[in-house]
Image: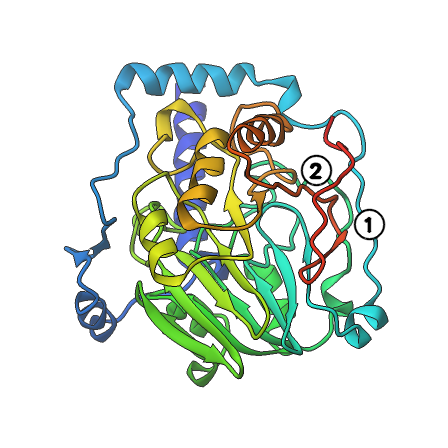
């Protein structure tokens, strides 16, 4: 009888997961045959999957998988802060009226950029759970955001680096789609947005090295070393990458998610030097060193792309790996100092003036 109960429970769980994967809008859209033919023209789409510029693997053996499972079961009490993190409030009226070129960090990899009179959101994961369901994964470290989605001003553009849940959030897109003019995304991500009710005329898909403009702002979608996918069987079905954002007065680089590689130097040679760079620094592990950088590599990437200053991102909001929650900031600060690379780590919500960048800061993460 116990065997029947366990077997029935397992079968029910499999059925629930299968139904959720096939029915939930969180999973995103499907790719038509015409889409796949278009992707093949990119030059790095093979057998239904996008490929990195260099061979890239996640170093899992049976033994390392077992060790990783044990480590996650054991956990790390320091992987989440044991106190409330500071979140500064951003005033919607001040945002709408202030003409200063600035960034506001929402934690993890999400930013609101005001440049050349335009409001641009970058990887706006503004929800509480970086997963398809609140039942899966961990919750955001902070209860509130600097400003709620409903209070944001009209958004001229949303830039997306790739379709993982901690960068492309269904709930956030639903809240933003009626106040956003255009969406700039990697190849394949348009299928998700169309499935979520956004008209194709507002979706602009990009291959690596594709260039575009948001009025006076020039943008380019550049490579990263990573992967994509939102479901159980669509790994790397959409492209991933980084963004160059070149306004009248400031030139920015946003790395998205990436392992370390020669593409940083390539981007720097083609589009640098940069005034400021937002570079991935968090959620790393010895089993996936090729798709996420260690903090020391983040500082090295800043040197490679030729930026005047840098900010570590992809940390401070979610537990997606087992390192201490503040370890990325501690390690990257040390390496940046060694490399004489100016580094800025603002509190969540603190406005970053791009015209008067100030690298003197409170060590709030300790």
324 horizontally vs 83: left or right: left
Identify the residue shown where x is 78% and y is 36%. 362
Residue 236 percent location from the top left of the image: 30, 51
- Look at the image and tell me whether residue 352 can be seen: yes
Q: Secondary structure at mark 1?
A: loop
Identify the residue shown where x is 39% and y is 62%. 271
Residue 125 percent location from the top left of the image: 59, 55
In which quadrant is the C terminus drawn? top right
Q: Which mark is residue 88?
A: 1
Quadrant in the picture for residue 244 = bottom left
Circle 1/circle 2 CB separation < 8 Å: no
Quadrant in the picture for residue 171 = bottom right
In which quadrant is the N terminus drawn? top left
Identify the residue shown where x is 19% and y is 58%. 44
Along the line of sight, the residue nearer the viewer: 254 or 93: 254
Position above or below: 272 against 16: below
Residue 235 percent location from the top left of the image: 31, 48
Give the mark nearer the N terminus: 1 vs 2. Answer: 1
Q: Dot 2 corresponds to which residue?
A: 141
Position above or below: 144 against 62: below
Mark nearest the camera among 1 and 2 is 1
Between marks 1 and 2, how big is the CA–CA gap? 14 Å
Identify the residue shown where x is 72% and y is 58%. 356
- Look at the image and tell me whether residue 240 can be seen: no
């Amino acid at each position: 009888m116990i065997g029947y109960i366990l077997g029935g429970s397992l079968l029910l769980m499999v059925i629930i997961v299968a139904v959720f994967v096939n029915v939930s809008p969180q999973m995103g859209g499907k790719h038509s045959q015409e889409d796949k033919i278009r992707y093949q023209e990119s030059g790095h789409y093979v057998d239904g999957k996008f490929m990195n510029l260099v061979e890239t693997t996640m170093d899992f053996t049976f033994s390392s998988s077992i060790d990783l499972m044990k480590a996650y079961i054991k956990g790390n009490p320091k992987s989440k802060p044991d106190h409330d993190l500071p979140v500064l409030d951003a005033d919607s009226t001040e945002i709408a009226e202030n003409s200063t070129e600035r960034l506001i960090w929402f934690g993890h990899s999400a930013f609101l950029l005001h440049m050349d009179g335009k409001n641009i959101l970058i990887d706006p994961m503004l929800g509480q759970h970086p997963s398809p369901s609140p039942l899966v994964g961990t919750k955001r470290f902070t209860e509130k955001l600097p400003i709620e989605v409903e209070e944001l001003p009209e958004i001229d553009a949303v830039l997306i680096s790739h379709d993982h849940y901690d960068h492309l959030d269904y709930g956030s897109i639903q809240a933003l789609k009626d106040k956003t003019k255009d969406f700039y995304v990697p190849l394949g991500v348009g299928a998700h947005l169309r499935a979520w009710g956004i008209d194709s005329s507002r979706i602009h898909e990009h291959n690596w090295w594709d260039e575009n403009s948001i009025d006076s702002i020039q943008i380019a979608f550049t490579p990263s070393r990573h992967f994509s996918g939102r479901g159980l069987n669509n790994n790397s079905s959409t492209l991933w990458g980084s963004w160059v954002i070149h306004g009248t007065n400031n030139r920015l680089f946003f790395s998205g998610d990436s392992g370390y590689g020669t593409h940083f130097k390539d981007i720097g040679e083609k589009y640098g030097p940069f005034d400021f760079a937002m570079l991935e620094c968090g959620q790393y592990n010895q089993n996936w060193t090729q798709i996420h950088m260690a903090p020391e590599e983040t500082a090295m990437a800043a040197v490679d792309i030729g930026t005047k200053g840098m900010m570590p991102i992809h940390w401070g909001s979610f537990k997606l790996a087992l390192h201490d929650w503040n370890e990325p900031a501690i390690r990257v600060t040390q390496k940046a100092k060694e490399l004489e690379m100016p580094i800025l780590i603002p509190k969540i919500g603190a406005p970053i003036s791009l015209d008067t960048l100030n690298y003197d800061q409170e060590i709030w993460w300790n």
